[in-house]
Image: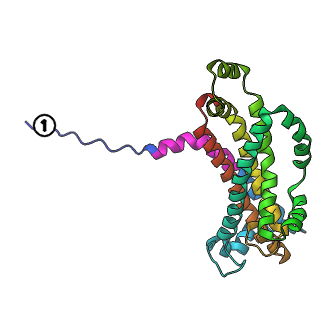
Amino acid sequence: MTVAQRRPASPKFDNGFLSQLQKQFPNIVPPALAILIFLVLWQLFAWTPGATLPGPIQVIRDTWILILYPFYDKGGIDKGLFWQILASLQRVAISYILAAVVGIGLGILIGINQTMSKALDPIFQLLRTVPPLAWVPISLAALRQNEPAALFVIFITAIWPILINTAVGVTQIPQDYNNVAKVLQLSRKEYFTNILIPAALPYIFTGLRIAIGLAWLAIIAAEIVMSGIVGIGFFIWDAYQNNNVSEVILALVYIGIVGLLLDKFMAWLQNLILPAEQK
């Protein structure tokens, strides 16, 4: 008697990647369609008589070398877009970290000391409304060099949301927490690490997330008016002076992408560090 052998079942086409893609499909399609519609409208506008801005097709034609070769380095300021963006990101990182350290420290000091808060609040409210470009001539006059002046402009722009949000977070600590600390007779170090910082952390991250966007905006403004330095801001200004509008548009796209990635990174870091009940 011959026993019919059962043919092995063919592997299912559906796998982990496709399942994940199907889950993310509703989130991918709307922005993809919006970007496509925007590009089509932009191209149609560029084809209208009298239009002065190039369309996306012309931008790609004019800048395809910059797109394909972002890592070239011919010395001086003649570098690919990767190096231009990297130089700007390095300045942002240095000043942003310094702004975070100083801003969180001063925010905590102001939050726990009402006298200090009343004394410094008018000064902080006055300085935080000054636009980044307004700090450029002051920083150049005081520091005399482009690099430290650019770092100062980023620092003075990024520090305010960190400082203010930290101070608000400290003042919003529930009174019950403070009462528990008194009952348990916690030392200042224990109160700081176990109550103050955990309670104020959501506010601190809100300030940090706002500040990273402002820092990226500030470096672009600073580099535009500071000649002779490698950076995406000066790249834009140099391209505009040479009437390379397509290069300006390409740089703006890269700036937007980098800004989006910085914000997403801070959001990921916030979700990673904050407890579930504080998210």
The residue tagged 1 is 3
| Figure quadrant of the N terminus | top left
Can see residue 279? no
Where residue 229 appears, x then y in whole percent? 76, 73
Residue 78 in view: yes
Magenta highlight on residue 19: yes
Name the element at disc 1: loop
- 15 vs 125, left or right, is left
Q: Residue furthest left?
A: 1
Residue shown at the point (66%, 33%) measured from the top left: 192
Label 1: how many Cα within 10 Å (few below 14, some 14–19, many 20+): few
Is residue 279 shown left or right of residue 136? left
User: Would you identify the image quadrant in which residue 205 lies?
Assistant: top right
In percent of width and height, residue 46 lies at: 82, 65
Please tell me whether residue 139 is drawn above or below residue 14 in the rendered image.
Answer: below
The amino acid marked with disc number 1 is Val
Residue furthest to the bottom: 74
Image: 174 above or below 61: above
x, y percent for residue 84: 70, 69
Bounds of the magenta span? 17-33
Residue at 70% over, 33% down = 200
Total marks placed:
1
Q: Nearer the viewer, residue 211 or 181?
A: 181
| Residue at the (51%, 42%) spot, across then down | 20
- The spot of residue 222 in percent (x, y) is 82, 63
Residue drawn at the location 18% of the way across and 40% of the way down = 5
In this image, 152 relative to 17: left or right? right
Q: Along the line of sight, which residue is nearer the eye, 143 or 243?
A: 143
Q: Quadrant of the C terminus?
A: top right
Main SS, magenta residues? helix
Which residue is at the front of the view, 2 or 102? 102
Q: How is the image coloured?
A: rainbow
